[in-house]
Amino acid sequence: MRPLLEATGLVKIYGRQKVLDKVSFVISEGAHIGLIGRNGSGKTTLLRILAGDEECDGGDVRQMPWARLGVLRQHDLLPETGTTIAFLADGSGRPEWECAKLAARFGLCPAELQKAPASLSGGYQMRVKIVRMLLDRPTLLLLDEPMNYLDLPTLLLLEEFLKDYPGAFVMTSHDREAMQNICASTWEIERAMLSEFPGDLETYLDWKEEQAEFVRRTNKRLRREMADAQAFVDRFRAKASLATRAQSKMKHIAKLRTQLRQTGTDLPTAAFRIPCPRITSGPAVVCDGLSVGYGGMAVVRDISLDIPRGAKVGVVGENGRGKSTLLKTLAGILPAIDGTYKWWHHADIGYFSQLSEDTLSPDMTVLQALTAAAPSDASAEQVLAAAGAFLFRNDDLEKPCRVLSGGERARVRLARLILRAHNVLILDEPTNHLDVETVEVLAGALKQYPGTVVVVSHARTFMNALVDRLYEIRSGSIRHYTGTYEEYVSDLTAYSEEVSHASADVADERIEANKERKERTAVLRQLRRSQERFEARMAAVDKEKSMLLAFFFENPTDYAPDKAMRLAELNDELSSLEKEWLAVEEKIILA
């Protein structure tokens, strides 16, 4: 397979920290690469260098002439004006019908396409970014945390899309299951070096543990040998007859010391316990006929639930259906539209927003951000201990928040949260941008936390490890799902397949429903045939239009009124066809 991109001797230094040290590699056609590493290890930096968004301090990147890059950036802002469909069409140069067709694959219906991109929820904005990138028909995708903010149905859809993607991609993600399901090879950045492994994530981690165990055994043998030699030196160094042998032993100790090797397991990992005042049994919160929403408009209605103290509750459902709105209402940030909710009288709520911009000032240093969030009676030692628990020490404490990576910002915000001893935690996407190791530690700490946790997250490993109660929001209402999170994912996958591939067989007792389904299927078939005819005609018009444009480009001074008139006719016809195609698409959505 042909190479698409080649990097040679890449070096990147931030202050006194070297994040990339002479990194070299080649990405070939069809490569499906998962890029892993601790927060701040340089994953996003490497992708930014490959995308041309950041310069390296040494080495170079060579993109082959036949390669087309598609880049998904974490922090790109979408426009606040204009429609989403216009943003996709204008940015890609593709006709609106083609943009709408691809957008539909990612659950963007005509209603969302008529809204301003920046007005959509975080998950829908990520869908827009993915569609915009794919419209350029890239051969190499650079995907920095594409799973962030996606709801579970869209995440599963993106997984299926990337599994069968004919081009190459390099992807970072905190979702270990997604990496395992999608990526055929694994790269890891550790201590500024890049390791390449020709296998999936789990196979790589097993291999890495075997290597680490071998290094541990080797180091143990070397240290034992060094200790024996040192004992000889300490005992006989003063004796003239053995001084030469003692000197030789000391040289041998120095040689053995150079053979000691580091392992990935000796890298620092966040380690913390979440404090909680003593709690008694009973209900933590009771909702009675609660409706939540914005501007007087309810998005979820008639919420009646009773959450006991100490429960670990997961709220699930599609993006834009009211999960974050419910959490903000329970946290007291938004007023209830209707009904009531009541926390127990000793409830002390800590809230974690999915947007770091809500809580972190970019000009504050890490230490200032933690000190500002600490209780007034907290000592400097307590603040420093919380910082150290989340791996902020020495020079890291003086970093401005604006230069932190996404994972580092998330760790600062978690440290701020545990500086106060809350007995209720409401967490909206707390795992976004965190590395796998920190996600596992967070799940374990929350599981051991005696207080109440209400969490929204699409990280499957995290939710599996934590929640013991699930509530699903769907179609403006909420229901208690009685199974485990793993069973919920399985049911959701089966439901999605059932919707996508509707069976022609129905039970005998539902003859009337079967008749309606058949009629709807016939209507959909007829509408899709109409779409196919429009698409064929639009392709023909596009081809003729391109030929005319090529003629005018090559003969700018020729007088050709017939061709100019024909070009105007084609533009009018194409505009009319696009409108008719979109009208049919609207009918398909509503059918």
Image (tube, grey):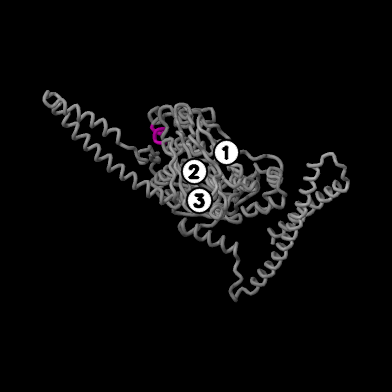
Prevailing SS of the magenta stretch: helix
The one nearer the camera, 124 or 93, is 93
Which amino acid, by three-letter code, is at mark 1? Ala
Quick one: label 1 or label 3, which is nearer the N terminus?
Answer: 1
Magenta residue check for 123: no
User: Mark 1 = which residue?
Assistant: 51
Please say if 478 is above or below 254.
below
User: Mark 2 = which residue?
Assistant: 430
Which amino acid, by three-letter code, is at mark 3? Val
Please say if 385 is above or below 161.
above
Q: Residue at x 38, y 39 (%)?
A: 271
Q: On the picture, is 357 further left or further right than 591?
A: left
Asked which secondary structure carries label 2, the reply is loop
Q: On the picture, is 544 further left or further right than 165?
A: right
Q: Are marks 1 and 3 in contact (CB under 8 Å)?
A: no
**Magenta segment, which residues?**
385-390
The label number, if any, that marks residue 20 in the structure image? none
- The location of residue 149, given as percent across then percent down, is 55, 46
Which amino acid, by three-letter code, is at mark 2? Pro
- The location of residue 522, given as percent across then percent down, is 70, 68
Real-space Cα separation, disc 3 to disc 2, in angstroms:
24 Å
Please say if 499 is above or below 332.
below
The label number, if any, that marks residue 286 in the structure image? 3
Real-space Cα separation, disc 1 to disc 2, in angstroms:
28 Å
